[in-house]
């Protein structure tokens, strides 16, 4: 019966969503920043190091998504093959995953935009790349807060 | 490329020439020099050329350029400050306080013995074998060398060696020793510690603010702005120590919150009395200023201290990605397993080192820029940039060129 395995199913759904949405957001953010970076490099290839760092910044949300995936899978015991998870716990994991799913996805998009603008800044004033990095990192704070909300909730759910 | 450098030097010279006042036979200019070298520059000029030369020290209100002087340890981290800006004239140099905090926070965020060692080796290679000593790369290499040492130390504290490589590779027979506690096992403990450490970092920033106020001749203003918040934030931690489970005895909790209550009252009275310090004496305006001060600082301190929770997030990210790599790398058996271990493990850990290292560098800097500098730093200055042969592709070894300016 499907309902017998409702707990593990919900848990895997939670873990997958946590890895999926921030990953997609990061891919979009890094992708957009990469396009902007290629334009700058066409003019001046020596700026590669500076624009690469800026391009990588929106990529962290994907990592936080994978981190949440791992936390849900290992805390629930699924990673070790434990299928004995109550549906309440599974639903709990699904709800606990919401912050990183939504905030991780959206913050990656916005951080990608700030990174693109930062790359345009580096094109004109390469010596100010540090400031461009800080501007992009300001957005990431909210992904970090969402990650902590998810992880701390996952830790407190009893299987 | 050589021609590019020649043109660059010529154009720098031309633009410096343009700032000189000159007639056919004479010219006149004034410039900022390092105060310690002023006398020797005057000697050099009057001995070697037919010139009239005099110097004076900067006035208080003048916008003079900034030249930082620090010992080798502190100076290694000045690249972090230079990315942000220069201290305003009349402000004290934040580097001696910032350098140790940057080193500690970076080490916590990338707390892994294996990654620290790899980073250390890469930096030592850059400095001693590739001889990258000048420019941005050289500064970064020196800064990361010290930060990598800190990573190794924190790696021992939290028990990380390429994540849990020893445990994964030996199926749990050998475990890497943990000096304090494993963040994966007790994340709340690390969260509390991060925020407590953040409060110490902010307190240090407030101490610098008091020092800066003293330099500007307003020691009293610096004290009344900061002392109440020292009291209130400490009290908040004393009250929270019970609910967070740091102390268990009920008597101590009651005693601490009793003391904390009085600290908050004293702090509040100080704010009420002195928040409008230096302004109008109208009681309504002063109460309004006090309320505004309380609101701004309460929300400010809350978000600043919460921001240090990123230390926990980065510690977990570093070690979890490493664990995922280890799970992938130890999946095979036989000859194929060994190959998989070397390939997947090597690539995965290098990738994680690059990503986590970048995160640690960037977020440790953010905690300095936004939270720490927010407590005291104006940063409206400009760096001392003497005329020199600033080249991009060739390196000129110079000793005496500097003295000429």
Image (cartoon, coloured by chain):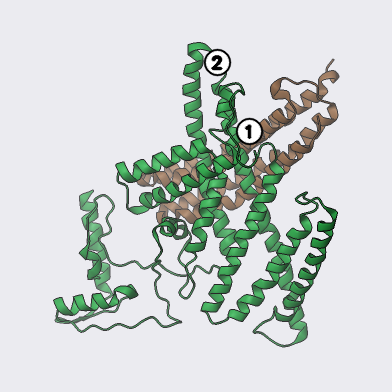
Chain colours: A brown, B green
What label does residue A28 carry, if any? none
Residue lying at 48% horizontally and 60% vertically, measured from the top left: B84
Q: Residue A71 lies in what quarter of the image?
A: top right
Q: Quadrant of residue A24?
A: top right
Disc 2: which chain?
B
Q: Quadrant of the C terminus of chain B?
A: bottom left
Q: Mark yes or no: residue B375 visible.
A: no
Q: Mark 1 lies on which chain?
A: A
Question: Crowdedness of circle 1 by 10 Å Cα count: few (<14), some, many (20+)?
Answer: many
The answer to whether B15 is drawn above or below residue B59 in the figure is above
The residue under label 1 is A66
- Which quadrant of the figure has residue B28? bottom left
Q: Which residue is nearer to you in this view: A79 or A66?
A: A79
**Location of residue A132 with respect to A103 vertically, above or below:** below
**Residue B141 percent across, percent down from the top left:** 39, 48
Mark 2 vs mark 1, CA separation in Å: 22 Å
Labels 2 and 1 share a subunit: no
**Residue A62 x/y as whole percent:** 60, 36
Q: Residue B332, labelled with which disc?
A: 2
Q: Residue at x 42, y 80 (%)?
A: B62
Instruction: State if disc 1 and disc 2 touch (CB < 8 Å).
Output: no
x and y, in percent, of residue A116 in the image: 51, 47
Task: Give how far across and how far down residue B303 sits, in percent.
Answer: 68, 57
Q: Is residue B377 left or right of residue A89?
A: left
């Amino acid at each position: 019966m499907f309902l017998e395995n409702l707990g593990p199913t919900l848990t895997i759904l939670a873990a997958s969503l946590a890895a999926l949405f921030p990953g997609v957001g990061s891919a979009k953010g890094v992708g957009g920043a990469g396009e902007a970076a290629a334009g700058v490099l066409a003019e001046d290839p020596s700026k590669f190091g500076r624009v690469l760092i800026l391009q990588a910044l929106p990529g962290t949300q994907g990592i936080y998504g994978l981190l949440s995936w791992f936390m849900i899978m290992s805390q629930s015991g699924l990673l070790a093959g434990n299928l004995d998870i109550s549906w309440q716990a599974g639903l709990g994991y699904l709800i606990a995953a919401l912050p990183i799913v939504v905030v991780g996805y959206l913050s990656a998009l916005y951080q990608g935009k700030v990174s693109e603008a930062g790359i345009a800044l580096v094109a004109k004033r390469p010596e100010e790349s540090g400031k461009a990095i800080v501007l992009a990192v300001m957005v990431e704070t909210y992904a970090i807060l969402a990650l902590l909300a998810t992880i701390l909730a996952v830790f407190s759910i009893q299987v | 490329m050589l021609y590019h450098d020649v043109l660059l030097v010529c154009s720098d010279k031309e633009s410096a020439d343009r700032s000189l006042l000159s007639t056919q036979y004479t010219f006149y200019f004034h410039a900022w020099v390092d105060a310690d070298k002023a006398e020797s520059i005057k000697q050099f000029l009057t001995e070697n050329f037919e010139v009239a030369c005099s110097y004076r020290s900067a006035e208080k209100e003048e916008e003079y350029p900034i030249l930082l002087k620090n010992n080798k340890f502190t100076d290694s981290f000045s690249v972090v400050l230079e990315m942000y800006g220069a201290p305003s004239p009349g402000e004290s140099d934040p580097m001696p306080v910032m350098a140790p905090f940057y080193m500690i926070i970076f080490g916590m965020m990338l707390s892994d013995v294996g990654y620290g060692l790899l980073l250390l080796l890469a930096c030592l290679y850059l400095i001693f074998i590739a001889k990258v000593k000048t420019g941005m790369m050289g500064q970064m290499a020196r800064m990361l060398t010290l930060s990598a040492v800190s990573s190794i130390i924190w790696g021992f504290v939290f028990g990380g060696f390429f994540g849990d490589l020893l445990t994964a590779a030996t199926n749990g027979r050998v475990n890497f020793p943990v000096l304090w506690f494993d963040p994966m096992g007790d994340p709340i403990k690390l969260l509390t510690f991060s925020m407590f450490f953040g409060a110490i970092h902010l307190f240090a920033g407030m101490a610098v603010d008091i020092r800066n106020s003293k330099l500007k001749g307003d020691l009293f203003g610096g004290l009344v702005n900061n002392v109440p918040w020292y009291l209130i934030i400490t009290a908040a931690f004393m009250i929270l120590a019970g609910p967070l489970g740091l102390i268990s005895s009920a008597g101590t909790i009651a005693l601490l919150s009793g003391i904390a209550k009085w600290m908050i009252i004293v702090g509040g009275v100080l704010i009420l009395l002195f928040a409008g310090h230096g302004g109008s004496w109208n009681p309504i305006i002063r109460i309004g200023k006090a309320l505004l001060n309380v609101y701004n600082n309460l929300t400010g301190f809350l978000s600043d201290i919460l921001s240090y929770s990123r230390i926990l997030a980065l510690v977990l990210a570093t070690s979890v990605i490493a664990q995922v790599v280890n799970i992938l790398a130890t999946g095979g058996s036989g000859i194929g397993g060994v190959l998989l271990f070397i390939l997947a493990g090597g690539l995965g850990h290098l990738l994680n080192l690059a990503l986590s290292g970048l995160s640690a560098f960037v977020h440790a800097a953010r905690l300095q820029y936004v939270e720490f500098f927010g407590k005291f730093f104006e940063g409206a200055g400009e760096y001392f940039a003497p005329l020199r042969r600033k080249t991009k592709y060739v390196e000129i070894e110079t000793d005496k060129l500097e003295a000429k300016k």
